[in-house]
Image: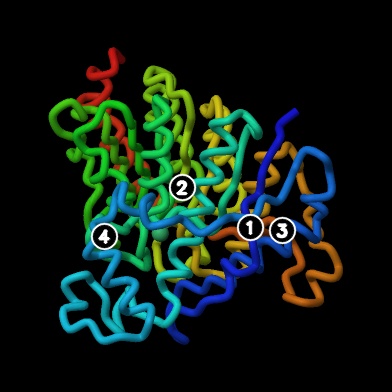
C-alpha cells in the first residue's frame, strides 16, 4: 500500500502578492480543505507533515547571496534602487511585498522535507502543493517565482547520490529547472508545455536539448494552443515513458501545475480533469519514488479539484464525484470532475495533433539516440 505525506501548513496560503495578482496563495487552502472534506487525511497511510522554513545556507546551494539580500530588503519594506535588475516591479509579474522572504522560504522548506521523507523511505510519495516554482533563476525572480524550490530539492537529492528524473506538466516551460541542470547528465529534465511562441516564458523549444555532458538530458515537448486531452496524452506517452525508463532514475520529481486546464485564465491548453488525472497516473507509473510538487493554476476551483484528484492518484483513492456537502456550501463547487467539456472543431483537433506529431518526431530524432532508443 502506498504511504503518502501531504506537506502543508495554513501559513503557506496566507500571503497576498498584490490584490489583483493572478497567483493567489489562498488556492492552497482551497485545495487542502477539499481533500480534508473527502477524508483524505483520515486513514493511516496518508499523513500531513508541517514544513519548516528553508535556511539561508540551503538557498545558497542555488541562489546568489546578493539576490537573497535583495529579497530580504524588499521583504522588510526597504527601497532597493536596482530592484528591476532582479526582475521585481510593483505592477509586474513579481511585485515586492512585505514578508516576501518569509513567504518564499517556506515552500522551499516544504519541498525539501518532501524530498527528504521520500528519499529516506519514510513515504512512497510526498505532495507539496505550495512548491513547483519552476521559473525562479539563481539571481532573479521570474513568473511569480522568487526561490526555486525544485532546483534546491533536486540538488539535495543529487547530494545523496541519486539520479533524478524531473517531469514538468505545467502549461508553462520549466525554464528555471532546465537551466540549472542544462549541462548535467545526472538530472533528466522533461517539460511538456504550451509552445513558447504563444506563452510565457517564450522558451522550451524542441531543439533545447542540453549542452556538454547534459546533451540529450533536457527534453522539451511544446504543444499548440488548444491541445486537448487525447493529443496531450498521446504525445506524453510517446516521449516520457521511454526516456524515463531508459534513464532509470532513483527518484522522480514532478511539477504538477494544473494551468493546462481549459478553464485556466492565463493559458490556452484545453485539458480536462480527466486528462490531467490520466497524466498524473502516467507519472506515478514511472516513479520508483515520487516527490510531487505543485505549480501553476489560476482558476481557484479548478486548482482545488485537480490537486484533489492528483492526491487521490497518489493514495489510490477514486473520490466520489459529488463534493461533500459542507465544502459545497462554503465554496459553491458541486462536482469534482468536469461535466461540460470543451468541444473543439475537427479542424482544430487535426491541427494540434499534426503539430504534436511533428514535435514527437523531432524528439525521436534529436534525443532518443542519446538514450539508446
Ligand atoms: Zn504555469
Q: Residue at x 65, y 67 (%)?
A: 10
- Foreground disc of the pair 1, 3: 1
Q: CA distance from mark 2 to mark 3?
A: 21 Å
Residue where numbered disc 3 is placed: 336
Residue farthest to the top?
A: 372
Does dot 3 land on a helix, a strand or a loop? loop
Residue where numbered disc 1 is placed: 8
Does dot 4 land on a helix, a strand or a loop? loop
Answer with the quarter of the image where residue 35 lies: bottom right
Residue 352, percent from left and from top: 35, 48
Q: Is residue 211 above or below residue 61?
A: above
Q: CA distance from mark 1 to mark 3?
A: 21 Å
Mark before the other along the chain sequence, 4 or 1: 1
Local packing at callout 1 (Cα closer than 10 Å; few below 14, some 14-19, many 20+) is: many
Residue where numbered disc 4 is placed: 201
- The label on residue 354 is none
- Foreground disc of the pair 4, 1: 1
Does dot 1 land on a helix, a strand or a loop? loop
Mark before the other along the chain sequence, 1 or 2: 1
- Foreground disc of the pair 1, 2: 1
Residue where numbered disc 2 is placed: 255
Amino acid at each position: 500500500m502506498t504511504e503518502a505525506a501531504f506537506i502543508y501548513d495554513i501559513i503557506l496560503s496566507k500571503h497576498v502578492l498584490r490584490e489583483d495578482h493572478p497567483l493567489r496563495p489562498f488556492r492552497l487552502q482551497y485545495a487542502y480543505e477539499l481533500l480534508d472534506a473527502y477524508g483524505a487525511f483520515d486513514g493511516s497511510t496518508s499523513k500531513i507533515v508541517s514544513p519548516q522554513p528553508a535556511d539561508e545556507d540551503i538557498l545558497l546551494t542555488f541562489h546568489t547571496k546578493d539576490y537573497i539580500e535583495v529579497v530580504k530588503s524588499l521583504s522588510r519594506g526597504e527601497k532597493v534602487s536596482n530592484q528591476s535588475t532582479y526582475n521585481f516591479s510593483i505592477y509586474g509579474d513579481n511585485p515586492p511585498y512585505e514578508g516576501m522572504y518569509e513567504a518564499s522560504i517556506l515552500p522551499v522548506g516544504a519541498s525539501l522535507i518532501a524530498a527528504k521523507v521520500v528519499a529516506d523511505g519514510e513515504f512512497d510519495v510526498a505532495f507539496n502543493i505550495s512548491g513547483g516554482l519552476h521559473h525562479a533563476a539563481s539571481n532573479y525572480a521570474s513568473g511569480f517565482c522568487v526561490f526555486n524550490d525544485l532546483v534546491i530539492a533536486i540538488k539535495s537529492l543529487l547530494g545523496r547520490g541519486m539520479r533524478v528524473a524531473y517531469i514538468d506538466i505545467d502549461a508553462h516551460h520549466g525554464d528555471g529547472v532546465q537551466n540549472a541542470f542544462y549541462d548535467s547528465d545526472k538530472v533528466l529534465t522533461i517539460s511538456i508545455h504550451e509552445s513558447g511562441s504563444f506563452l510565457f516564458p517564450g522558451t522550451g523549444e524542441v531543439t533545447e536539448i542540453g549542452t556538454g555532458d547534459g546533451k540529450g538530458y533536457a527534453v522539451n515537448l511544446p504543444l499548440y494552443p488548444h491541445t486537448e486531452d487525447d493529443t496531450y496524452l498521446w504525445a506524453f506517452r510517446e516521449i516520457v515513458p521511454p526516456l524515463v525508463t531508459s534513464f532509470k532514475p532513483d527518484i522522480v520529481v514532478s511539477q504538477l501545475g494544473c494551468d493546462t486546464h481549459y478553464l485556466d485564465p492565463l493559458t490556452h491548453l484545453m485539458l480536462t480533469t480527466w486528462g490531467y488525472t490520466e497524466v498524473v497516473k502516467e507519472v506515478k507509473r514511472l516513479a520508483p519514488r515520487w516527490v510531487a510538487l505543485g505549480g501553476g493554476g489560476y482558476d481557484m476551483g479548478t486548482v482545488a479539484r485537480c490537486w484533489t484528484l492528483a492526491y487521490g492518484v497518489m493514495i489510490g483513492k477514486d473520490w466520489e464525484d459529488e463534493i461533500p456537502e459542507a465544502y459545497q456550501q462554503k465554496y459553491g463547487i458541486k462536482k469534482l470532475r468536469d461535466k461540460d467539456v470543451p468541444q473543439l472543431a475537427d479542424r482544430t483537433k487535426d491541427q494540434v495533433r499534426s503539430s504534436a506529431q511533428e514535435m514527437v518526431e523531432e524528439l525521436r530524432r534529436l534525443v532518443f539516440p542519446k538514450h539508446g532508443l
